Image: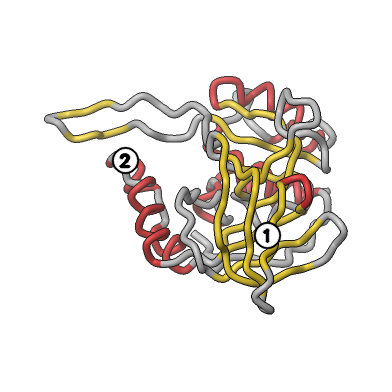
Amino acid sequence: MQKLKLTIIIFLGFGASALAQDFLAPYSSFIGNNTSYVITQAGDSIAGTLRSVSQDNGIIKRIVLLGENKQVHKFGAEELRRFAIKPDDFAKIDAISDNSFSIRQMTKTDYHEIIQREWLIYETQQLPRKKNKFGMLQLLNPGFDQHIKVYHHPFGSKSMPVKLAGIRVIGGEDRTLLVVKNGQQAQIVRKVSYDKSFTELFSDELELMNEVDRKPKFKNFAAHIFAYNDLKGTVYYYTTSIK
């Protein structure tokens, strides 16, 4: 237990950006003919190139894939477990642009990670506050998502912009994320009420609850997940750049 306590202190003392992979920067562009694959609900894997993507408020509802045998495959989101696509240079530049709204974001964004990323991963989840409504969401914590999956909230709230001499200093930062714990329905985690979400997500590990400040910070969400995974004895199967 003492080792686990030390791990928590290290993770939370240095923050997610120092020792652990932080959440990935989301992408918003899809380019046809990019290498892709899907995994169906039955567990079948189909590789090919992307023909088209249909979205509703930024959430993928339908995918058309051209298979290796030139067969056209059409899928609704509810038919798939996962969709992955290799981003091209245009998509990477677009992601860098989306994450450079302000000086603050420019200093926080890991552009090397964006350029080096091999796959964008989307998974089908039941949407929050929706009965039998499913959509594909972009996974932002691949590799440390064994218990808690964090997804981009494409129509969620962002911080208000503040400008000095016409230059945006802060603003445009995500203040909400979609989160799934242990296969449950997706829930919205908000920056403004993160202390409540923290309790709901991590209350089954009292050691973590006791080691975190009375007011847990939204910016340390990734570090909290790493500490939680450590307490669960998680074995990591994939990592990207360590910041």
In the image, is residue 28 above or below residue 67?
above
User: Is residue 112 left or right of 19 when viewed as pictured?
Assistant: left
What amino acid type should be assigned to the residue bearing mark 2?
Phe
* Residue farthest toward the front in the current orientation of the protein: 71
Q: Name the residue located 40 percent from the left edge and 51 percent from the top edge.
A: 109
In the image, is residue 96 above or below residue 67?
above
Asked if residue 223 can be seen in this view, the reply is: no
For residue 232, the mark is: none
Please tell me how many numbered marks the rendered image carries.
2
Residue 121 x %, y %: 62, 57
For residue 143, the mark is: 1
Q: Name the residue located 55 percent from the left edge and 56 percent from the top edge.
A: 52
Task: Say which quarter of the image contains residue 217.
Answer: top right
Q: Which residue is mark 2?
A: 101
Residue 24 x %, y %: 53, 52
Task: Say which quarter of the image contains residue 84.
Answer: bottom right
What amino acid type should be assigned to the residue bearing mark 1?
Gly
